Amino acid sequence: MEITLTKENFTAEVLQSDVPVLVDFWATWCGPCRMIAPIVEEIADELDGKVKVGKVNVDENEELTAQFGIASIPTILIFKNGEIANTQIGFCAKDQLVSMLLD
């Protein structure tokens, strides 16, 4: 299940998570974001319980977008133990995202 992330729930859902978290920064008007969305959703379903998957709409969450220095989308941040462990800017393959999460 994907979690809609906002500044109100980001700390609890991401920074305090005891499992790795994939955070997808996206926007409705972004073509590559729409291309990667089904992949992100598959990861959320297949790895449910092992990882969390959250989505940040950059147009609705400008504060979070600025906080993490998101300049282009889609940007995917992998958080482990409250820290950014990996960053992926732009479209990428599902197996690459999964290995970033689980390695």
Image (tube, rainbow, N blue to C red):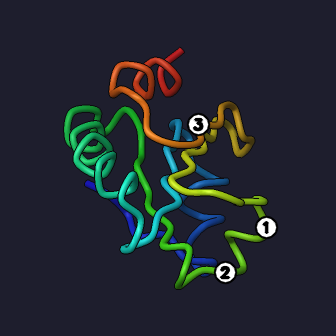
Residue at numbered disc 3: 88
> Which of disc 1 and disc 3 is earlier in sequence?
1
Quarter in which the N terminus is drawn? bottom left
Q: Residues within 10 Å of mark 3 (few under 14, many from 20)?
A: some
- Residue type highlighted by circle 2: Glu
The residue closer to the viewer here, 21 or 75, is 75
Q: Amino acid at mark 3?
A: Gln
Q: Label 1 sits on what residue type?
A: Gln
**Which residue lies under the disc numbered 2?**
62
Q: Which residue is mark 1?
A: 67
Q: Name the N-terminal-most of marks 1 and 2.
A: 2
Q: Residue at x 44, y 57 (%)?
A: 54
Q: Which quarter of the picture shows residue 12?
A: bottom right
SS under mark 3? strand
Q: Nearer the viewer, mark 3 or mark 1?
A: 3
Observer-nearest of 92 and 24: 92
Residue 10 vertical position relative to residue 50 in the rendered view, above or below: below
Residue 87 drawn at (x, y percent): 65, 37
> Which mark sits nearer the N-terminus, 3 or 2?
2
The kind of secondary structure element at disc 1 is: helix
46 shown above or below 66: above
Q: CA distance from mark 3 to mark 1?
A: 17 Å
User: Residue 82, image x and y in percent?
Assistant: 71, 45
Q: CA distance from mark 1 to mark 2?
A: 8 Å
